[in-house]
Structure formats: structure tokens, C-alpha cells
Image (cartoon, helix red, strand yellow):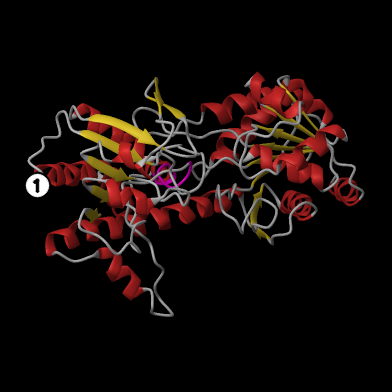
Amino acid sequence: MKQQLLKKIEDKKIKVGVVGLGYVGLPLAVEKAKAGFKTIGFDVQAEKVKLVNEGHNYIGDVVDNDLKELVEKGMLKATVDFSFVKEVDFIAICVPTPLDSHQQPDISYVKSSTEEISKYLTRGTMVVLESTTYPGTTEELIKPILEMGSGLKCGEDFYLGFSPERVDPGNLIYKTKNTPKVVGAVGRDATEVIAAMYRAVLDGDVCEVSSPAIAEMEKILENTYRNINIGLVNELTMLCNKLGISMWEVIDAAKTKPYGFQAFYPGPGLGGHCIPLDPYYLSWKAREYGFHTSMIESSMMINDQMPEYCVERASKILNRQAKAMNGARVLVLGVAYKQDIDDYRESPALRVIDILQREKADVEYYDPWIAEYKYKGRKYQGIAEITPESIATYDLVMITAAHSNIDYNMVQENAIAIFDTKNVMKNIKSRNNIEVL
């Protein structure tokens, strides 16, 4: 089986399946197809499937013309029918792994997808989980489901591995194509074949590790590292505010050191599909062994409290104007979780708005990338534009995303008060109405 698959990879005879056509799955499907492998994408959302089959792109990291051309050439198509699994030799599972209402891992999407795959799995197929999860998922959860549902044996009849997604929406340098990959699989042969499949598609290096658990833990480490360091600077930011010191200037000074320091920056909280969630997966798994990840949990507590802290600071700014939060007109600039993208998953700005509204503030938002968003079952509509006249009507402008296509000079010239949680106005000289986190 190993030699047959390696030959099929070399000859571009592998047919690829991608389960989940979101921020991870669609770019991966496009790159597989561009590399010469016929690809079938699956999604439970019929609208996404329809858009793909019409050649209409909905993901920022995919080039519109690439998708259209691949569909027209018959290299890429999408379906809502899981029986497509019978047709493919390689399956990447790229489904969401969110947290539930109790901040515990919700792996229901992974489990249900695996159960459906097992019904149609054929001999000689590679199955790879890309969704971020806790160490042990691939071997403890996916492997038994696939074996039981298919009657096949892992390592003999099919290969199973884990290769964590590395997607950074809006990154202008690193995309799916050129970002290095990590592969850990069940058995040496599986690792070699799955790594060969990725090497046939991607320009980035492929790092082979000894097991799926190593690859799963590696992904958690990547994002926990960032979570902890961001927690550190957020905590020091709160201290620096009491000391009357600019944490932003402190960081700028510290990063002049050419070794031993990497700059992380404070903000209103953590957003995105990985950093706010992944440490919870590790903490949850650690409790199974009676182990408490105290440093990780402390950083999560600090980062989780940042939206509340920012609202408290906003309240103090209003208080200096003899204004109560109750009834104050507040404009939130930016609800995306990072600059210049239309992704608001886990964005701290959503929590900031929610808390402001609970404090009875009259809140509106403007985001040139996001006209509307959904949060806690409600739909929120942004204002269509900002003008000098409209900015002057707000008691406070809170900047919660550092979008580059906003005229911050105009905002500064017309705003009564500004709370800049991203230090995006650092180069504006007139600062009489600006307070920085």
C-alpha cells in the first residue's frame, strides 16, 4: 500500500477530499487542486457548496480567479453528500473545534465527520485531521471510529495522521502554500506517505514527527505560547496604567534587544480561531491526569478579563467629562479580531460591545470590513460610514481593531474623547483627546 500510494502521489493520480470548506479547508482544497490533484470539497452548508461549484470565493486567503479557474477545469468541486469518500485516496478533516458553553472542548464536529467517513472508507485511503484538538484525539477518538465503522485496520488498510492547520487570515507573506507543515501519523509508513502528499502540494517544509500526539501537542504549544505572552503584557499594561507608564513605549524599548525577546502587544482581549481556544483544550486534557496548568490558566484569566478592563477604563474617561456610562453615546471602531480582515471569530470587540450595552451605553460600531455580525443569537448592524459630523456626536470613540483603511486623523480632529486600545494612533501628534490602553 505504501509503494502504491507513493507512486500515485508522484503521478498526480491521488484524488483528494476536504471535509469542511471554511478558513482552513477551502484554501487547502484550492492548493491541492492547483498542484494537479482532483479535489472534492465537502460541507454541511449547502450555500458554501453552491458558491464553490459556481466558482464564487468567500475566503480572504483564496484568490478569486484561482477558484473560478479550478472549478471550470473540473479540478475542484464541492458536495453535501458524504459518499464522496468512496472516490478519494486522501481525506483532510478541517472542521471547527470550538468550546462549549462551559469552556470545554466541543469535538462533536470531528466525531460526527469521522463517523460519516467511516461508512464509506475504502482500502488505501489516507485520513488526516487538521482541526486543532487535544493530544490523543487522533488515536483515541478517530482511529477506533474509523476501524469500527469501516471494518478496516489502521496501518494495514488505511493510513491515519494529524497535521495541524496553520492559517493566519490576512497574513500577506505566509499562506497555506508556503507555510511549513508538521505531520505525525500512526506508524512510520503512514508518516512517510502523508508527508509526501503534503510535499507534493506545498512549498513550505514538512516536518515529520513520531506520532499524532506530538503533532497535536505541538499545535497547542504554538498558540499557548502566544496566549501566555499576551497575558503577560496585558497584566503589565494594567500595572503600567497605575504607574503612569506607557506599556507600548516599554515594549518598543525592549524589542531593541536583538536576542532573547519577542514583542507581544496588549489589547482588548484575544480573538481568532486558535489562541483564545487552544489552551482550554490542553487544560481540559491535563485534568484527566490530575494536573493543573497553572501558568496557562492564569494567562487565560488575564486575557479573558481584558474586555471588562477596557470598559472600566472607558467609564473613567467618560467620568472625566462628567458623563455616566448609562446613556453615553459610544462608537466602537473595528469588530474584526485583527486588522484588515473580515473575520470576527472570538473577537474581543464583540464582548466589549456586549458589556457596554449591559452598562446601558448607546453603542454603535463601524468596521469597513464587517457590515454586520452575529453574537449570542443577535444580529448587529454597523453604521455605513463615519464623517467628521458623525464622529463629533459621540461621547467616546473606542478603537478595538487597528484597521489601516480608517482616517484616524479625521477621527482625532473631531472626536470628543478617544480610547485607543490598539495604539493605532501612535503617530498622531495632537493627543489632547486620546487615551491609550
Query: Label 1 amino acid?
Result: Arg
Of helix, strand and loop, which mostly describes the magenta segment?
loop
Question: Dot 1, how many residues are within 10 Å of its Cα: few (below 14), some (14-19), or many (20+)?
Answer: few
Residue drawn at 51 percent across, 39 percent down: 342
Q: Which of the 4 image quadrants contains residue 207? A: bottom right
- Using the image as rendered, state which of residue 263 and residue 186 is in the foreground: 263
Q: Is residue 319 left or right of residue 193?
A: left
Q: Quadrant of the N terminus?
A: top right
Could you tell me residue 318's position as x and y percent? Answer: 14, 42
Q: Is residue 142 left or right of residue 391?
A: right
Whether residue 111 is visible here, answered yes or no, is yes
- Using the image as rendered, state which of residue 420 and residue 129 is in the foreground: 420
Whether residue 155 is visible here, answered yes or no, is no
- The residue pinned by badge 1 equals 320
- Using the image as rendered, state which of residue 246 and residue 28 is in the foreground: 246
In the current view of this chain or complex, which residue is farthest to the front?
Answer: 389
Residue drawn at 74 percent across, 51 percent down: 198
